[in-house]
Image (cartoon, rainbow, N blue to C red):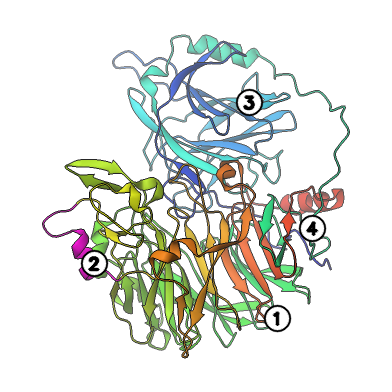
Amino acid sequence: MHRCQWGLTPFTGMFTVILWGLLSAFSALYVNAQDSTQWCDSVTDICFSRHYLEDLDTTFGYLFPPLPSDGQPPSDEFIGIFIAPASTGWIGNSLGGGMRSNPLVIGWVNESTAVVSVRFGSQYQAPTPLSGPVLTVLGTSGVNETHQRIVYRCQNCTVWTGGSNGITLSGESMFGYAVHATIKPNSASDPNSSLLQHTAAGEHNLDVANANTGQYAAYLEQLLSAGPISPAPPSTTTTAPIPTRTGELCPGAPAPTYSMVAAAGWRVTPVLGRLSSPRGITMDGRGNLLVLQRGVGVTAHEVDEFGCVTNSETIVADRSLNHAIEINPAGDKIYASSSDAAWSWDYDPAARTATNRTTLITGMHNDGHTTRTLLVSKKNPDYIMASVGSDGNIDLASFDPASGRAQIRVFDMRTIGAGGVAYNTSGQVMGYGLRNDVGMAEDGAGIVHSIENSMDNAYRTVNDQRQDVHTDNPAEKVYRLGDPTNPTNLFGGYPYCYTVWEAEDFTDRSFAPGDWFVQESNDTLTDEWCNSNAVRPTVLLPPHTAPLDMKFGVGDDTNLYVTLHGSWNRSPPQGYKVVVVPGQYSSTGEWSPSAGLAETKTISNDLLRNVDETQCQRGCFRPVGLVWHPTGESLYVTSDTSGEVFLLKRGSGVSRSRPCLPSILSALILAMVLSAGSPYW
């Protein structure tokens, strides 16, 4: 067996879910709607309506047939063009704006050959190949020294059922886009290959009425008869030596996809790669890692005495599972969730088997935030907590705890009967007014804490004028929810009260970090109302950094560890790291930060970060889940967009992990395994 490996598990298919559109808390960098402009292609002299990503030097172009005469049916096709740097992994668009229930067109270049595919998904999970649309690669596609271009014809592509129901041919229509800036599909010659999650995504407006031309038929004929562009000439330069990693922990482990820096006193290495969007992670009593992979289910990974993975297998095959994996203190049950339900399984850590699935909680789905974090109390193991986020950025109806949204509920599993219980009519409310508290953790006293993803596009109304304060407000934050056996129905302020991070952005009054603000005051909802009614958080973290997990240190380590998945609603981006918040324990084991609320703005330190977080549209390590080895010497971290699990180990010096290529043998093995994969993106 291999000491460390590429995560080549024996399940049929290696999947990665590609999230578009509204799933901001768990998607990659996401940009709001922008307009397209007219642009003429210098290769063909054909003019397209183009959306251009300047930071990524990437083009999404469209050309439509002329509108029909009155009483005539419109055409159902268009010509599209993708242009991106030659190093880009793949380029894609949604013909209806968001991901869900709209055709998704993707393209890439395999060596010098353009490949295109169309897929469809009704939920934020694995899209599958879509029958009906017909894609044809057109001439002038290919790759040269600097860029790849995919020119395609999309027939039967303007009307569909669901989503936006089609492209508005006589006016403006919304399109979506997604890019992976570095990694090509797992099997690049296969149009239906699985993909790693995008590194950038967004939407743009297109005036389709101005994107049509009476010369469409002539342009189509020109492209059908044109050949590919000239491929890049063979390199005559000497290949540079493959970079090596310092502080290597697992010889033979996969190289990291992106360069990272660990804090002094820590070393880092990947232990698994090419996973399918790994999210939650935990460890059983025998030291096996359990990882929830979107599009796969739960996988178990045997670990040696060095913390390196030696064997992998799937123990729960369920593509609906999307985030949480939890284990009870006795180690004989595991728990996992989809966007709608939570289940338990009997678990045997020696055999690494999960059997007897039992439904615990149902009715959690909404169309906004779809992650359902679970936490089983160690002090009171009959109690399980489940978090449900808001139905969108501002979910006014969630102010009512009976909505079952933007809240955390606790359930006594001894009272759950066959078939489970409905979320919003069962259990007790630990806290509501919590916009999207993905991370939860329990301290030594059995007190539960949560960490919130706060709102996007924040503003402050002054003299009836909206002032944009969204770049540096509001703060992400940690709440002390309390004892799960005695919930207090804590109100965290959402959807009306938000927490100041950068006080200087507000011109109408003097604020300090951690103060409450409302976007727009009225006779009832004011800053003062928030001060009187909302429970203040305990820790502030930078805005838009999307905290997804939190774990307290082990043993004498009194710090709080947090994964920051990274921003989409901020320029420049920030986050994309694991940070440490200094803290302390009381005599009873209750945790608190080592500074007052306002001062927590400056006390956190980076544990594992990208080299330059401002360049994360081009690809980054994006941490999601954390789990400690029981000794507290090793911390495992998942990264969903790169499909990796990392081992952080206490040691000496600063560790820098740099990407390099796997060996030819490893690449061949990877290709053989991926050839069995089921197609979707």
Nearest-to-viewer mark from 4 and 3? 4
One can see residue 458 in this view: no
Amino acid type at mark 4: Thr
521 to 33, vertically: above or below: below
Q: To which residue does mark 4 refer?
A: 246
Residue at left 59%, top 13%? 42
Instruction: Name, please, the residue furthest toward the left.
Output: 523
Q: To which residue does mark 1 refer?
A: 351
Label annotation for residue 531: 2
SS under mark 4: loop
Left-right relation of 332 to 78: right
Nearest-to-viewer mark from 2 and 3? 2
Amino acid type at mark 3: Arg
N-terminal-most mark, 2 or 1: 1
Q: Is the residue marked by circle 4 packed among few (<14), some (14-19), or many (20+) residues within 10 Å?
A: some
Q: CA distance from mark 2 to mark 3?
A: 55 Å
N-terminal-most mark, 2 or 3: 3
Magenta span: 521-535
Q: Is the residue marked by circle 3 packed among few (<14), some (14-19), or many (20+) residues within 10 Å?
A: many
N-terminal-most mark, 4 or 3: 3
Q: CA distance from mark 2 to mark 1?
A: 53 Å
Label annotation for residue 452: none
Q: To which residue does mark 3 refer?
A: 149
One can see residue 19 in this view: yes
Left-right relation of 137 to 63: right
233 to 550, vertically: above or below: above
Residue at left 25%, top 51%? 519
Q: Is the residue marked by circle 2 packed among few (<14), some (14-19), or many (20+) residues within 10 Å?
A: some
Q: In this orientation, which residue lies closer to the viewer: 651 or 308? A: 651
Q: CA distance from mark 2 to mark 4?
A: 50 Å
Nearest-to-viewer mark from 4 and 1? 4
